[in-house]
Amino acid sequence: MARHIFPVRVYYEDTDLAGIVYYANYLKFIERGRSEWVREMGIDQVAMKRDAGVVFAVRRVEADYLQPAKFDDQLDVSTTISTVSAARIVLDQMVLRDDAALFTAQVTLVALDAQGRPTRLPAEFRRKIADFDTSL
């Protein structure tokens, strides 16, 4: 299964007074990882909204905090596809430091139309996901 890796450096603004990454910032890290994954597949989300009227929304996040990340750590956000249906994508994401998992999450994304109702993933998006999932 293909895996996308997005590097993240922990800055002072990401931490609490103890120099440990504030728990909500892991959600920001994995959001950036997902955004870069979509961009690197050649999908323009602004154009998808404009042309197909489709956007993504997070429907569910199940997360586990395993070890703390600290100021100045170099981390990697790993994204893999778990399942894809007509209107939903489930991704497995991890935040790693030197290949040790610090945070894991399973994220469910849904496709929504301009009225905020569930809709099918655009065919081009499904094709690019299929190509990515078999690329490595």
Image: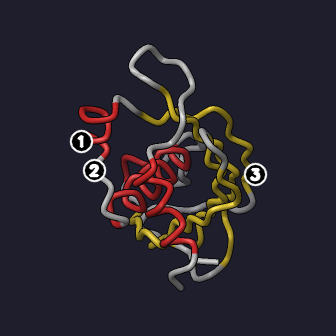
Q: Are marks 1 and 2 in contact (CB under 8 Å)?
A: yes
Q: Quadrant of the N terminus?
A: bottom right
Q: How is the image coloured?
A: secondary structure
Mark 3 neighbour class, 10 Å CA radius: few under 14, some 14 to 19, many 20 or more: few
Q: Amino acid at mark 3?
A: Asp
The reply to whether the C-beta atoms of the residues labelled 3 and 2 are less than 8 Å apart is no
Q: CA distance from mark 1 to mark 2?
A: 5 Å
Q: Residue at x 45, y 61 (%)?
A: 71
Which mark, by number, is residue 44? 2
User: Which residue is tagged 3?
Assistant: 64
- Residue picked out by circle 1: 47
Badge 1 element: helix
**32 shown above or below 127:** above
Query: Which residue type carries mark 2?
Result: Asp
User: Local crowd at mark 1 within 10 Å, few (<14), some, or many (≥20)?
Assistant: few
Whether the residues at callouts 3 and 1 have beta carbons within 8 Å, the answer is: no
Residue 96 coordinates in the image, percent (x, y): 59, 71
The residue depicted at 70 percent of the width and 60 percent of the height is 82
Residue 16 in view, yes or no: no
Q: Secondary structure at mark 2?
A: loop
Instruction: Please tell me whether mark 3 sits on a helix, a strand or a loop.
Output: strand
